[in-house]
C-alpha cells in the first residue's frame, strides 16, 4: 500500500525539518520503505518550501507524490497551488491564520489553528511544524505516534526539545478531540 | 547484513568517498551538490584527509589533479555551471592520465538555469565537453544505494584505468532521502605503484600494458606532466608516430576494457516485445511505467545503462534485434536518443519522449505516450 504525505508552506516554517521527522519515524522506527523529497526556492525565508513523503511496503519507483492522502498547507499559496491533486478520499489540513480563501465547497479541507497553538505553546511561530505533525499523527492511522515522538527527540536540539514536544502533544490533542 | 541508514544521495556519496579511500576534496559550493562538500568538510579531518574550499570550480579541479599526483584519491563535486568550468582541467586530467572523481549533480540548464530542480541535460557534455579525442567513464545511479556503491566504483575505475571518472547524478537522486544498507565488505582498488626504480620510470610507457603505473610525487620519482602531446617520459613531442601511439593507448585503455567497465540493468526484459531506455531518476520512473503497462498486458521492459559512458552499444543492439519498439525517455529535449538511434535504429523502431522544465516526468505521461505509439503501429 502506497501512502503519500505532503507539507507545504513558506521558508522559515520548519517544513523541511517536519519532512525529516516523518521520514525518520517511518523509515527508522517503523521500518517502512520511504522516500523523502522536497521542493525549495533560492531564498532562505519567505519563499515556497515543500516536503513530501512516499511510504510503501513495496519498492518505491516513482519518488514524488502524485495524489496525496494528506496535505498540510501553511500558506495561502500552498493551498492555491497544491490542493488540486489531493485524493478525493484524502484530507487537506490548513492553517487558519495563513489560509483564508478557499475554492468553493472542498470536502477534503479542514481548518486548524496551527500557528496560534504554536505561538501559545512555545511563544514562537516556527513550532507550527511540530503542531502539524501532532495533528496528523492523531488523524492519520498510518502514523505511529510513538515513532514520531522518538524522531522528534532525535532531530530537535536539546535546547528546544521540551517546547517542541509540548507543541506536538497540543497538535495531537487537536486531532484526537475530533 | 550491513548497517541500515536513512540518508540523502549527497551524504551517501560523501560517506562512500571516505570508504573508497578518498582523502582529498576540493570544491566550490553549488546547489544541488553542496551537501557533498559540507559532509566531507566534517568527515575528512577525522580521517587525516584534507578539505579545501577553493575560489572557484576551475581551481577545485586543478587542486584535485595536484592531490592525485601526490598519490591521494581525490574528489570534487559540482553541478552543471560548475561542471562547465571544470572542463579545461578535466581535459588535462584525461591527457595526463590522472585518476580523479568528479560528481556532477545535474540541475536544469542551460547556464545557471534551475538551481533547485532536476535535469538530465549534461549527458553529452559529460562525453564531449572537452576538445580533442578521448574516452570518459561516467556512472549513473538511480537510488541512494547505488549512489553509495557507484561512488566506490568510480574511485576503483579511476585508479584501475588511471583516468578521471564522472559520477553523474541529478537533483532528485542527490537531494532525496531513502534507506540504504551500507555493505560490510567492499572491494577497493588502488593504483599500481611502479615496479622500477625512479631512474628507470616513465609515466607514459605503454610497453608493458595499456595503463602505465603512476608514481606519486614526493617519493623520489621525478617526471613531467603536460597537456601537450608527449612521449613516454611526459615531455612534449610532435612526432606523429609518438603522438598517435600515445593517444591510441589512452583511448584503448578504455575501449579495450569496455566489457569490464560497461554495465546495464535489464528490468523485465526476458519476454519483452517493447522496451524503455532510460537512466538515473528517469529510469526509476520508467520502472513504475513498466510495471503499470505490464499490468495492462503490454510486454514491456526497461534497459537501463549504469555506465552512461562508454555507451552500452552491444547490450542495446542485442535487445534491439529482438524488440518491436524502443522508447527513450529522458529529462531533456533529446540527447541520449541520438546514441540509441545510432545503434538500435537499424534493427527496430526508436521513439523519444522527454522535456526539461525542472520536474521529474510523472509515470502517467510516459504511459500515455507509449500506449499511443504502440496503438499507432
Image (tube, coloured by chain):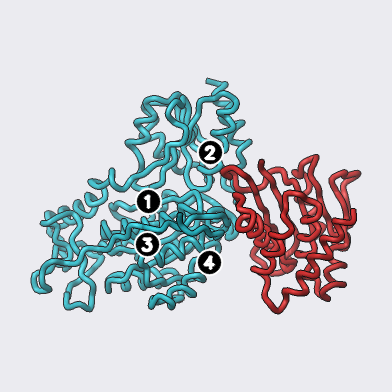
Chain colours: A red, B cyan
Who's the residue at 68% across and 71% down the image?
A156
User: Which percent across, then down, holds residue B299?
Assistant: 51, 25
Describe residue B334's horizontal placement relative to residue B347 as left or right.
right
Q: Image quadrant of residue A2?
A: top right
Q: Dot 1: few (<14), some (14–19), or many (≥20) neighbours within 10 Å? A: some
Q: Are marks 4 and 1 on the same chain?
A: yes
State the CA–CA distance, disc 3 to disc 2. Answer: 29 Å
On the picture, is B352 further left or further right than A28? left
Which residue is the site of mark 3?
B101
Same-chain status of marks 1 and 2: yes
- The vertical placement of B272 against A56, above or below, is above
**Mark closer to the chain start, 4 or 1:** 4
Image coordinates of residue B158 in percent, x first then y, are 31, 59
Q: Secondary structure at mark 2?
A: helix
Tell which of A52 and B279 is nearer to you.
Answer: A52
Q: Residue furthest toward the left?
A: B200
**Residue position marked by numbered label 2 in the rendering:** B287
Which label's residue is closer to the chain start, 3 or 2?
A: 3
The numbered mark, 3 or 4, whose residue comes first in the sequence reads 4
Residue where numbered disc 1 is placed: B127
Tell me the residue that label 4 is attached to: B35
Q: Earlier in the sequence, mark 1 or mark 2?
A: 1
Amino acid at each position: 500500500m502506497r501512502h503519500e504525505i505532503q507539507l507545504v508552506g513558506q521558508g522559515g516554517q520548519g517544513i523541511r525539518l517536519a519532512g525529516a521527522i516523518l521520514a525518520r519515524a517511518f523509515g527508522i522506527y517503523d521500518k517502512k520503505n520511504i522516500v523523502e523529497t522536497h521542493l525549495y526556492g533560492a531564498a532562505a525565508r519567505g519563499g515556497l518550501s515543500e516536503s513530501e513523503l512516499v511510504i510503501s511496503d513495496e519498492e518505491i519507483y516513482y519518488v514524488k507524490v502524485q495524489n496525496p492522502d494528506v496535505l498540510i498547507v501553511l500558506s495561502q499559496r500552498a493551498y492555491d497551488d497544491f490542493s488540486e491533486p489531493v485524493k478525493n478520499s484524502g484530507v487537506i489540513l490548513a492553517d487558519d491564520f495563513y489560509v483564508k480563501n478557499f475554492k468553493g465547497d472542498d470536502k477534503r479541507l479542514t481548518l486548524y489553528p496551527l500557528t496560534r497553538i504554536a505561538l501559545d505553546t512555545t511563544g514562537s511561530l516556527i513550532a507550527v511544524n511540530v503542531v502539524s505533525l501532532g495533528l496528523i499523527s492523531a488523524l492519520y492511522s498510518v502514523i505511529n505516534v510513538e515513532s514520531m515522538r522518538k524522531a522528534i527527540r532525535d532531530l530537535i536540539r536539546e535546547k528546544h526539545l521540551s517546547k517542541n514536544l509540548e507543541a506536538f502533544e497540543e497538535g495531537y490533542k487537536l486531532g484526537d478531540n475530533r | 547484513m550491513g548497517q541500515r541508514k536513512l540518508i540523502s544521495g549527497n551524504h551517501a556519496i560523501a560517506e562512500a568517498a571516505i570508504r573508497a579511500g578518498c582523502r582529498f576534496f576540493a570544491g566550490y559550493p553549488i546547489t544541488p551538490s553542496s551537501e557533498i562538500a559540507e559532509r566531507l568538510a566534517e568527515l575528512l579531518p577525522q580521517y587525516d584527509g584534507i578539505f579545501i574550499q577553493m575560489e572557484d570550480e576551475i581551481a577545485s579541479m586543478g587542486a584535485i589533479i595536484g592531490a592525485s599526483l601526490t598519490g591521494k584519491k581525490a574528489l570534487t563535486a559540482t553541478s552543471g555551471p560548475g561542471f562547465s568550468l571544470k572542463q579545461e582541467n578535466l581535459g588535462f586530467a584525461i591527457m595526463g592520465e590522472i585518476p580523479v572523481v568528479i560528481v556532477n549533480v545535474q540541475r536544469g540548464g542551460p547556464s545557471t538555469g534551475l538551481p533547485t530542480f532536476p535535469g538530465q541535460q549534461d549527458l553529452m557534455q559529460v562525453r564531449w565537453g572537452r576538445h580533442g579525442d578521448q574516452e570518459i567513464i561516467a556512472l549513473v545511479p538511480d537510488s541512494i544505494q547505488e549512489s553509495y556503491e557507484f561512488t566506490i566504483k568510480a574511485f576503483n575505475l579511476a585508479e584501475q584505468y588511471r583516468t578521471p571518472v564522472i559520477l553523474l547524478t541529478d537533483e532528485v537522486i542527490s537531494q532525496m532521502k531513502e534507506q540504504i544498507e551500507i555493505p560490510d565488505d567492499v572491494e577497493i582498488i588502488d593504483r599500481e605503484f611502479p615496479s622500477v626504480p625512479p631512474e628507470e620510470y616513465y609515466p607514459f610507457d605503454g610497453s608493458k600494458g595499456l595503463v602505465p603505473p603512476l608514481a606519486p610525487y614526493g617519493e623520489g620519482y621525478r617526471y613531467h606532466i603536460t597537456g601537450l602531446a608527449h612521449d613516454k617520459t611526459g615531455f612534449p613531442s610532435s612526432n606523429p608516430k609518438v603522438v598517435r601511439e600515445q593517444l591510441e593507448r589512452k583511448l584503448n585503455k578504455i575501449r579495450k576494457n569496455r566489457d569490464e567497465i560497461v554495465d546495464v540493468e535489464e528490468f523485465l526484459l526476458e519476454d519483452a516485445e517493447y522496451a524503455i531506455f532510460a537512466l538515473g531518476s528517469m529510469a526509476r520512473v520508467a520502472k513504475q511505467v513498466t510495471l503499470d503497462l505490464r499490468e495492462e498486458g503490454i510486454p514491456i521492459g526497461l534497459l537501463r545503462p549504469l555506465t552512461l559512458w562508454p555507451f552500452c552499444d552491444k547490450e542495446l543492439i542485442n535487445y534491439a534485434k529482438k524488440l518491436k519498439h524502443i522508447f527513450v525517455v529522458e529529462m531533456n529535449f533529446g540527447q541520449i536518443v541520438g546514441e540509441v538511434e545510432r545503434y538500435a535504429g537499424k534493427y527496430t523502431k526508436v521513439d523519444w519522449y522527454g522535456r526539461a522544465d525542472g520536474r521529474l516526468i510523472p509515470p502517467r505521461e510516459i504511459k500515455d505516450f507509449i500506449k499511443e505509439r504502440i496503438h499507432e503501429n
